[in-house]
Structure formats: C-alpha cells, structure tokens
Image: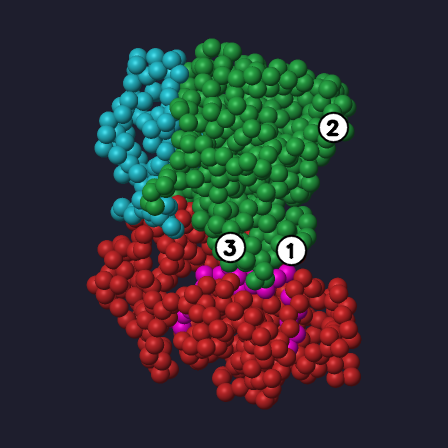
Chain colours: A green, B red, C cyan
Amino acid sequence: MITTMKCDLLVVGAGPAGLAAATTAAQQGISTILLDEQAAPGGQIYRAITSTPIRERKILGDDYWHGESLLEPFKHSGAQYIPGATVWAVAQMTVADATQGFEVGYSVAGEARMLHAKQIVLATGAQERPFPIPGWTLPGVITAGAAQILLKSSGMVPGKGTVLAGCGPLLYLIAWQYLNAGIKVDALLDTTPPGRLGKALPHVWGFLTSPYLFKGLKLLREVKAQVRIVKGVTSLEALAGPAPNDQTLQSVRFTAGGQTETLAVSQLLLHQGVIPNINLAQAVGVEQQWNELLLCWEPKVDLWGGTNVSSVSIAGDGGGIAGALAAEHRGRLSALQVAHQLGKITAAQRDAASVAPRAALARAVQGREFFDTLYQAPEQFRLPTGDTIVCRCEEITAGQVRETVSLGCPGPNQMKSFLRCGMGPCQGRFCSVTVTELIAQERNVTPQEVGHYRLRFPTKPLTLGELAALPQTDDSKKAVIRLKKPV
Amino acid sequence: MTEHAHAAPVIIIGGGLHGSSTALHLARAGVHALVLEKNYIARHASGVNAGGVRTLSRHLAEVPLSLASREIWLKIQDWVDDDCGFDQNGQMRIAEDEADVATLRARLQTMHDHGYTHEEWLDADEVRSIVPAITPSIQGGLIVRADGSADPYRTTRAFRFKAQSLGARVIEGIQVQQLQRSAGQWQVQTDQGLFTAPVLVNCAGAWADKIAAQMGEPVPLDPVGPMMLVTTAMPHFLDPVVLGTGRPLSFKQRVNGTVLIGGGRLAYVDRERDWSELDFRQLAQGARTVCDLFPHMKQAIISRGWAGIEAQMPDGIPVIGPSSTEQDLYHAFGFSAHGFQMGPIVGKITADLITTGQTDLPITPFSIARFQTGAPFLTQEHFHG
Amino acid sequence: MYNRLPEAEQALALAPVIVTINGKAVQCREGDSVAAALLAAGLNECRDTAVKDVPRGPFCLMGICYDCLVMIDDQPNQQGCMIPVRSGMKIERQHGAREVQA
C-alpha cells in the first residue's frame, strides 16, 4: 500500500515548462512534485533527450539539444520526479480535508494513487492539430510529431515512399533532420495558401528581429535544395489499395496549381500546427477561449499563467502556443507566482526575479505572429465534408456532423449525445476543434459561441480495476450515499 | 417577436423529459403549450441519466404510475415516431448475500400484498443463466422481464420534436426570472421579455424549488449529482440492466458494447454554475462493487465520467400535481434516479389535470402539500415497500 | 516500413530484446515502444476498430489518440506507444471490441 504523498506544488508535465517550473519552485524551497506520463523527462519537444540513441548532435540540431540545459538544474533542485504517471483527476470540492488542498488521482504502472497539493501548475503542453483529410485514419498515416518521436526515441526513420504534407515549420524541421540522417523524403506537400505571405507580411518586423530568422532561413534553404517541395497544395487525400478490402495506405493524391497528381506512398506524415492540450485544464474548471488566429481553444491565463481557478496555473504551450523557449520562461514565471502565493517571497521579490524571464519570454515570442499568420491551417483542411472521418475513435464522418447540426444540434455536447462524437478514449483530443468549427460554419456563428466539449474526469482513461483499488480513507468508506432506493 | 407569440395557453418551465412529455400530451389534446428551457432540451438530468426503463424496485406509490408508463413505452414508436433506443432486455436486482435475499423477499411480499405481480423471484441458478458473467457467489434476485432501457437524450428529443410537430413551441436558452399572477394570467418574466399564459407547469428539475418558493409553497429539494461512468466498447456479455441491493449499483451494457455504471453515488454540484466535480473516491467504491460482481470488468477501460444535476426529494418520490397555493399551476419535479421511465405517463397526468381537471392515476402521495403538514403524508409501509 | 539508423541498429545488435509479434519472433532495441517495434517490423496496422471493423495503426505516438491499441501478453487495449518492449513479450493484433477475460 502506497502512502498518499503531499506537496506544496504539483507540476503536471515534464516538458520545458514543467521542468523549469518545478526547478524554480524547488529552488525557492517549495516542496514540489513533478508528474509526467512518459518514462523520461523532456515532454514532446525534447522527447527522449536523456535516452535517444542518436548521439550525432547534428542530426537533431541545436534547438533540440538545448533541452539538456533544463535537466541538471532540475535534478539538483530538490523537486521529486515521478515518471510514467498519468493524472486522471484533480479534486477540490470532494476532498476529505480541505486544508490539504487538491487531491490528485493518478496512475503509475496500472496502479491508481492519490497525492495532495496546495498549488498546481499544469504544463501539459501541446498536441498535433487534427488534420482531417480523406483517409487520414489509414494505417501508414501518422503525424509529423509522431515521426519525430520515432526519430528521437528510437532512432527510426521512414523507408521508401514517404511524403510529408501540411503546413508549418515542423514539416521543414523534420525534413531537415532526415536529411542530416541521410534520408530524403519523396516530397513535402505544402498546403500554405499562396496569398498567405502577403497576409503575414505586416507582422514580419517581429520575425526579422527574432532569433528564429537565421536558423529558419538556413534550414529552409537546405531542405528546398534537396527535397521536392510542392507549394500551394489545395487538396489532399490518403488512398487505400486498389483491392476492395485493402485498407492500408497506398498513395497520396494532391492538387496544386490546378494539377492533380498521385504518389505511391507507404508513409504519409501529416502536420498542420499544434494546439494546446486542454483536457485537464478544462476538467478542473479553467475557462477556455477561442483563439482567432491559431484557431483553437486555449485556457484563459494571466501574465503569470494564473487562471480563474484559484491555485491552478498553466505554463507552456498548454496555456497557448508559443513554442519551447517561451515555455521554459513561462514555467519560471508561474513558479515565481506560486512562491509568492505560498508566502515564500514578497510581491516585490517576485517582480524582481521575474524581470529576466519576462525579457527572455518577450524575445522568445518575437516573430510568432508572423509564423502563426503564415502557417494558419487552411480552411479546407480544418472543415472536412462528406465521408472524411471527424471523430477517429467513434468513426463519425463530417457529413454526419454537418447533417446533425441541421437536425437541431447546436453544439458539441449535444453532438456527443446524438452521434457519440467525442465519446471515445481520446476524449475529443483529435476532434474537438474540428467539431467546434464545423458547427460554427453550419450555424454561421463564431466558434466561441458554439463552445467546446464539456470534459470531466477521468482526463485519461483508466481501468475499472485501477479505480477500484484506489486507497480509501476512513471518511470515504463511511460516506453516506444519499441517493437511496426504496428497500 | 410579436405580442401574439408571447402568449400561450400553457407555459411549461423546463425542457427536460417531463416538460417535453407534458407538451406532447397537451399537443395531442389540441393545446399548444410553450416550453421555456434555460439551456437546451435534455441539457440536465434528462440527457445524462442511465436510461433505465424500469418498473422494478419502485417506491410503492410510484408502482401504478410506472406500470401505466410502461404501456406507453411498449408503443413508444407510435407515440413519438422514434423507438428511442428502447430495448426490453429486462431489469434485475441482485442479492449478493443473505441480507440482500431477505430484503428482496420482503419487497416481493409487499408487491404481492398489493396485488402487483410484475416482479419475479430468481434463484441463484436462474440469475447465473441470465447473466453468465456474474460472480458465482450470487444468491438470487428479482427481475422484471418486460423492463429495459432506452437512450435518454434521444427519448427527450423525440418527445420534444413530436410535440412541436403537433403545435407545441419550444424556446431554448431563455431564463425565467419572475412569476406573477394577475387577472387570471401567469406573467412569466424572462431575460427575453414577458410571456403570459393562463396555466403554468413547473418542470424545472433541480431548480424547481425556486419556482415553488416564489409560489409560497417551498419544498426541501436537494440538487444532487448522481455519477455515471462509461467504458469503451466491449463484446456483448450482458442483457438485462443489473441493480444492486445492499450496495448501490446500476449496471448496463448498451447495444454499442459500452458499459454504463451508475448507482447513485454523488458528485459535488453547483447548480448556479452548471458545474460538477466527480468524487473519485466514491466512484472507486462503485468500481469495487462492479469488480466484485463482474470480475472480468477489472480490465474494462473507463473512458468518461459525468454527473447530471437532478432534483431529489427527501422521501424519494417526486412532486406531481396541482399547486397547493395557486390556481392553474402544476408541478412535476423531484425525480432524481427514478424519473426517466415515468416521463411518458407524468406528462399525460399533467395534461389530463390541465384539460379535464382530473387524472385516474393515484397521485395523492406526490402532492406538494405533503411538505407543509407536520405529519408525514405517507405511512412507513410506503417507505419500506 | 521504418528503419533504424546505424546507432540504433548497433544498440539493438549489442542487446536485442526479443518479442513475438503475431506469433513471429522479432528483435527490438531496448527502449523502443511496442508501437515503434511494430513499425520497425513493417507493420502499419495493429488493430481493427470496434465500430466499423477497419484496420488502424499507431498515429500520434504520444499517448493521446488511442489508435495504437494492441494485445500484450493476452491483455487487450494496451497503448503500444506508451509501453516499452520487454523480453518475451507477446504482442498481437487486436480485433474489434476485445473480449475481456475473467
């Protein structure tokens, strides 16, 4: 039987934001626990940084290896690290003893546990934006982020017949990393609309003075020199085999400049940006708002990552996409605010200590508006039609969703009840933004008005057996079940 | 909106199943009610309950209503042009130990004493043959073979749309603020203007006590959040709905393979913010019950949990019938954990009261007046079934 | 099909982890996830869905899509991308809504 742990600060997520937050907090003398799902720290952006088989640094590049700088300070900070831990509930109102703060339910190796924390920093990061094209559920189609994980964690690269498709710097980054490893993909199908550069140009000053500029241009040049890039792709379909029961990826069909072409592929790597992973934040009660530029839901946070839920703050991309460098500075800022709220430092001390991270944060986000405008996922790839799958888990199509709106389903929660859309194990992570936008389009209202799935615990599935074995307190055993049946 | 549209022969506050059912029955009688719903139809209890269509285990006072409602369920397609996902695989209440056996035997005796034969005893072998996946140590149970379950959201919507097709009106996203009676008309002040009707029906669920209070007949309504868990799809292993006896449980496998686990353990709810927080230690107790009874469920994956906000009355039965303080006001609320199956008949009862002044079903035990007298309205016999 | 870079191949050669995938013995690198091992073995598919019985394979590799569900050591619904390979592990394709064994 594991005893219930206690801490002043729980940080969820060991990416740059979480590592930095936990480090800063622990350095302030705050008893800190860092929980993370993966077996090793780094989150997704610095995935496998302590264990990657790729020793040759030039392959993954400097931006990746920068993540190492977060590890030593964390190791020596005094924060406790629990890897392989999946948080599935955070309780405030149903706790046995309110003086202990939150009760957090999490599982390690199939065993459910609880811990108590007075403050929580959620650093659950980002996820790939859904990319609902026809055939996106075919085996052989994975996200570019997934391909990066294979590269970083396992030193694996795709074989013959590989195409990258979508928009955003990550596609070029991974193409470049592959080139460094001696792998050339067959094509990079870029869906950035041709007129988009003009739209982004008003923001270019920020980009020109940002640290991303030279790195970005050099990378782009190298990729363009060696990989076939098709620009202005307006349609994309992943196709299965010619045989009627062959349901695995065989080719990708695309249109650009009025011409349609089909390429035989075994691997199709899709990416059109990342969006915040909001499930845990939303289940805890954090208000969400629709970001009009990034076209996604994001938690409402203040300058310290504070939210409408007392003692819950958010750091990193989970609070709005701003990139890995921004994430670590935001982590430090939330930790400083937590230190102040726990009475370890005065407001003046907090403000003084925050000067450097704030300046660093400002530098880190310079140029983002340019990128975000340039690489905004195009409408036709966010708003599918017909038989294109919207809800991967329950296999619901865009046509079904659109038709259901016209039958009087005004929002995603009704959609759940009607179609089971969003009711599968991914808990809406890969369909939420699509469903919100489809409903908004069909009803001709804003996504903000349409709203999002109402999410509750568990924020990650767990087995009934795990839940059943949760340690009980005397109070919970004696709790009166007030809803009585007649005997 | 025109002046004309703000008036209706009947205004129903609350667009859950009871409000929608009342609208349907009124519409069938040619009375075109207006339903005012503060969120959207079936947003609360009606959309998220376990969907149990049961006459089993009813409070004695509810039995005649429940049996009458079952007649509607058996022909639900004719009533609302939708089968509502109703399947009749039976409802069973199981005895885990001797204490449970005694409880159920006593219950069965009470049913027989009152002339009700819908509940049948099952011995352990019979239980195991109907539910092979259940723990071998099961001791027996009660069953109603003609019971079953349906899709609550779909059912409520079906009632709503059928009512509308017959002339009822529904406005969603409208908040009732004040109620006043003047010159034989109900003045219903909302955040979208004033509506008037000679007759008012209170189907406001977990908020119905606010209306009752405004009418000078306060009730001790408790807004509660019974919790539900649902699993990912599993191969079919269960036909009837299974209810617990000594330990609370409601356990059902839907056609799509997912398993619904309820039992009435309560979440924290804030009815002003439409907010709930699941009590996962309580859910763990429920999970233990399930795993004890159905050992293979240890590996079932819980993909979601939720809690509706429902109205519970202290004596466990709802409020149905005319107001005790005002003319032309009717109540139908307080159904938490036992309202779904009764929705079809309660709407008919209310509609009959409005159109004819009477109902042939025994609704005296449900009178709102019972909360005003000092002595309990119901005898012990009613409580212990 | 995914291939291992030389460094990863060397690590595998030095200390291979041997699992079975659909009955066939496969060598993996210690630290690979089950999903990665499947992809390296040339298998894009790991299961058939419960609703429409169509094949799926790993998609996000970060534990949130639930498409990489496989049978591991006779246990269904295991997220392949979140579980590292282990010597002697039995990995099998998952068909539809899996039977849960008592």
Which residue is pictured at 38% across the width and 50% down the height?
C52
List x then y, in percent, for residue A440.
Answer: 64, 51
Instruction: Farthest residue to the left: give it.
Output: B125
What residue is at 34 percent from the left and 20 percent from the top? Answer: C29
Of all chains, the one bearing label 1 is A
The residue depicted at 67 percent of the width and 62 percent of the height is: B173
What chain letter is assigned to the residue under label 2?
A
Disc 3 element: helix
Decide if residue A138 is on the left or right side of residue A68.
left
Q: Is mark 2 on a helix, strand or loop?
A: helix
Residue under label 2: A201
Q: In this view, does A243 lie to the left or right of A100?
A: left
* Chain label for disc 3: A
Q: Quadrant of residue A64?
A: top right
User: Which label number is shown at residue A443?
Assistant: 1
| Secondary element type, mark 1 | helix
Amino acid type shown at disc 2: Leu
Amino acid type shown at disc 3: Gln
Q: Are marks 3 and 1 on the same chain?
A: yes
Q: Which residue lies furthest to the front in this view?
A: A259
> The N terminus of chain A appears in which quarter of the rendering?
top left
The residue identified by callout 3 is A400
Q: Mark 2 or mark 3: which comes first in sequence?
A: 2
Please tell me how crowded label 3 is: few (under 14), some (14-19), or many (20+) other residues with Cα within 10 Å.
some
Q: Relative to residue B244, is residue B326 depicted above or below?
A: below
Q: Share a chain, discs 2 and 3?
A: yes
- Is the same chain shared between marks 1 and 2? yes
Name the residue nearer the viewer: B289 or A165. A165
Which mark is first along the chain, 1 or 3? 3
Q: Quadrant of the C terminus of chain A?
A: bottom left
